[in-house]
């Protein structure tokens, strides 16, 4: 059974020094060694393999926008589509 995670806030994101912050639904904000912060979505492929994709960099991609992209990508996954880099507007940010 999936764990429930308290939703992130912008204040928490700005103040946190943690390497990874989780928002729920597979969405996380990962701090790279360079200090950059990247939104990533973790998911499981139909084959059972675990995977993750980048949804963009924070703060260019806001928390609200990252959640929207997460929902769009999860909808594609429910349809059984196999994701590749820049295969959809939800993934690469071009709309």
Image: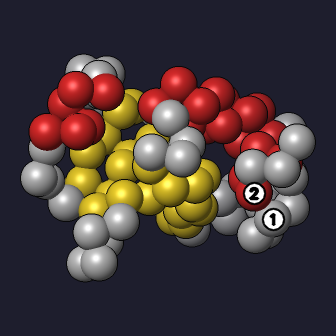
Side of 55 relative to 79 (left or right): left
Residue 20, relative to residue 49: is it above or below? above
Q: Is residue 68 above or below residue 54?
A: above
Q: Residue at coordinates 29% horizontally, 62% vertically from top-left?
A: 31
Position of the C terminus by quadrant: top right
Is residue 42 among what the camera can see?
Answer: no
Residue beneath the point at 66% across and 37% down: 69
Residue 50 in view, yes or no: yes
Sooner in the amino-acid sequence: mark 2 or mark 1: 1
Q: Which mark is residue 92?
A: 2
Tell me residue 68's x, y (percent). Answer: 64, 28
- Of 42 and 65, nearer the camera is 65
Badges 2 and 1: C-beta atoms under 8 Å apart?
A: yes
- Mark 1 — residue? 86
Give the quadrant of the N terminus: top left
Residue 37 quadrant = bottom left
């Amino acid at each position: 059974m999936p764990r429930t995670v308290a939703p992130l806030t912008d204040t928490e994101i700005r103040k946190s020094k943690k390497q990874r912050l989780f928002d729920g639904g597979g969405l996380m904000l990962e701090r790279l060694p360079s200090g950059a912060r990247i939104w990533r979505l973790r998911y499981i492929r139909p084959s059972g393999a675990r995977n993750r994709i980048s949804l963009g960099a924070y703060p260019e991609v806001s928390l609200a926008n990252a959640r929207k992209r997460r929902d769009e990508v999860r909808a594609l996954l429910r349809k059984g589509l196999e994701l590749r880099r820049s295969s959809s507007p939800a993934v690469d940010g071009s709309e």
